[in-house]
Structure formats: structure tokens, C-alpha cells
Image: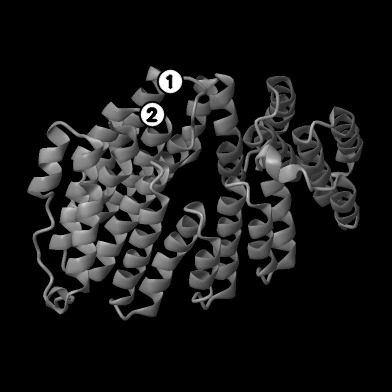
Amino acid sequence: MKKLLLSTVMGMMASPAFAQSPTVSNDHKPNQQTMACLQAPTRDCALSSALQTVIAEELGVERAKVLVGVATSMIETGQREQAVETLMLALDEARTVKITFVTQEKIKEIAPLLARAGDVSGALVVADEIENHGIKDGVLAEIAAEAIGNGALADARVALGKMRNRSRAFWRELTLLARAPDKALTTVKLDDIEADVRALGRTEQVYRGLIQLAIIADRKGNAVARDTYIAEADELFSGVVGIAARADATAQRASAMHDASLEAALVRASYDLAALHGDRVRDGDTLQDIARKLGPVEAALGDLGRAFARIEQFKTVEAKAAYVASLQPREASEEMVSKMSEVLGQISDVDGAYERDIIRLKLLDGALKNGSIDLASNIVRSMEDDDNQALALARMAPLLN
């Protein structure tokens, strides 16, 4: 069914009769197809109703938005070839807008997803269309992350090699190696990376590099090297000057070890150190940055109370939604669902239907990560724009049967 419908969509959109209309409908309320699916959502109806919304939509950029959501779910459900086709269709739709900025914003989404679907070469070709070098570097870094997530270290290094900011590329590679699948680390030589780390100038940079080396050594099964790097980093820490700098360095350490799924004792020890230094910080911006790093660690360690307390560091509903969506306990948690539902209830106070939907989409990411079908369904039902609801419904598809 999905293959047939996607073929139909592609055929209809390729037709001259389906060219973009200069007239934009004012009626963007949730449509009959998505609302009917939400009565008893299934994976088939989620994707098909999203695609039906694409067919009815007049604006290319809106069609592209929904198609990206459909492609993302296709990747997650193993339909990679169809996902690549859908992403390229989304890119074609984005180009119909004839506004470079709009098209390049979509490329920022589409290129990394092409890499996630296994088409790294296509992702790099698409990324070359980005004109701003800083933005392009960010997209290339994301492409590298998706490639290494698939175990394709060589492809990741090709993407990193295209980044203009070489320092940023170096740190990105260290971070990615720490999270890479075991099979991607077999050819990685610690000595080569260590030489680059020791060549760094600032004490906090060497400290951070040693921690990354320790994580990579652990992932390679070399506990002796891991402990040696951690001990050296601990000795070096006294040279990190300033409350904020120490808080940031230790928070990065705890976050990196958590992201790399190191053993609980190592994560806990690093977290305790980070919490000690983080509690000394008073600057609001620094506190928010620490919350973003330590909140997910606390949630994973089972300390949801402390993770939730950090929400108060964020002043806007959008920032609160993004933060709470980043939290993922190791086991399903009613407390987590309750907290996300609480933030969902606050969205109605935000001005603008589009702005409210953007926040709901952020919160949906958290519901999906935590596997809460009921919460995800509530978020999708609360969407006010038809295209945003179709996008959200498509994103929910992998949770459905």
C-alpha cells in the first residue's frame, strides 16, 4: 500500500497539472485524513494520510516538510531505498519555492537524512549546494555522525575532511569515535589521536581530549589505557581555571561518558564531579548549558527529580520543551510522561499557532524517544496546522503497528 501510494504521489507531483499554485489556501486546519487516522492510528494510515496531505498541499515548502517526516519514519522502519526517493522528492519540492534561503534550510534537514539512509555520497552532493561555510560545516558534521552511526567510518571521515573549520572537524571526529559502533573502531589507532591531543594548546582542551581518548580506549576494550588517560586528565584538571570553565569541562566529561554508554560506575563518578562543580555556578546562561549536558545523564541514572529541577533554568516554553524532550530514562517512566504532558499544557500560552506547533514538534521528539504512544498521540491531536499534524503523524509511525 505504502509503495503504491508513494508512487502515486511521485507521479502526480511530476505532472504539469500539479505545478505549484500561486494561490495559498487560508484553511490550514487539521484535515479529515489525519483526524480519521488518529481515531485508531496504525503505521499504514499514518504514512498514507501524511502523503494524502502532501497531495492536497499547494506550497512546495510545506510538501517538502511533510515528505521529510515520512522519509524519516521510512528510515526507522527499514525502508531505506524508498526513504532516499522521498527525500529527493522533498528536495525537488523545496526548490520550487525559488528562494535560496528556504531551499538551503531544507537541505540542512535532507542531507543528514540521506546519510542516515545509507546514501552518504548523495548527502555530500546535496550539502555542496549550501553557500554559507559555517552552516555547511555543521551539515557535514551531521552527515559524518549519521555515517558513523551506520558503522561507515571511512564515509564519516570523507565528510569531516570537507569541513573548512579543521579544529571543529577534529573535535567532531573525537566525539563520533567515542560513540561509534565497535566494528568502526577496529582500525582506529590511539597513538595517532593522542599525538594530536597533546599538540593542543590550552589546558582545558587537552583535558577534554584525554577524556575522549579514555572513552575511545574503553570502547576498544583497553581498560589499562582508559584508566591511564583518566588519571592524567585528573592531574591536569587543577590547571583548568575558573568556576565556569571547570563546570563546563566536567559536565562535558559526564555527558560524553554517558553518550558513549560507558559502565555505570564510570558515568556516576564523572557525574558526581560535574555536579560538584556545576553547583558552584551562578550565571544563568552557564546554568542552562550545564542543564543540557547533565539533565540527560541524571535521567539515565534514575535521578529524575534533579533532572526535572533543572527545567527552571529555562525561561521560555520552547526551551523547556527542548530540554525535557532530551531526557530519556533507561526504563519507561510515568514521571517522564507526566512532566512532558505538563509542558505540553503550557504551550497554549504561546502566541501564534505556527509557533505553538513548532514547540509541540520538539516535545514529540521526547515522546518518541521514550516510546510513549499515548503522549505522542495527544501531541499530534493538539497540532493546529494540517501540514504540521501530517508531519507529526508521519513521525509517530514507527511506534505503531
Q: Is residue 192 above or below residue 304?
A: below
Viewer-nearest residue: 311 or 145: 145
Residue 351 visible, this orientation = no
Viewer-nearest residue: 290 or 47: 47
- Secondary element at tag 2: loop
Q: In the rendering, which numbered label is found on residue 371?
A: 2
Q: CA distance from mark 1 to mark 2?
A: 8 Å
Q: In x, y percent, where is residue 143? A: 56, 58
Quadrant of the rendered image containing residue 99: bottom left
Characterize the local packing of mark 2: few (<14), some (14-19) or many (20 or more) Cα atoms within 10 angstroms: some
Quadrant of the rendered image containing residue 262: top right
* Residue type at tag 1: Ala
User: Which residue lies at the image location 74% right of the left edge and 43% below the top edge?
Assistant: 185
Report if the CB atoms under discs 1 and 2 are less than 8 Å apart: yes
Q: Earlier in the sequence, mark 1 or mark 2?
A: 1
| Quarter containing the C terminus | top left
User: Which residue lies at the image location 20% right of the left edge and 69% below the top edge?
Assistant: 13
Please give left or right for residue 195 compared with residue 119 in the image: right
| Tally of numbered tags | 2
Q: In x, y percent, where is residue 82? A: 35, 55
Q: In the rendering, which numbered label is found on residue 332?
A: 1
User: Which residue lies at the image location 8% right of the left edge and 59% below the top edge?
Assistant: 27
- Secondary element at tag 1: loop
User: Which residue lies at the image location 49% right of the left edge and 76% below the top edge?
Assistant: 129
Residue 319 visible, this orientation = yes
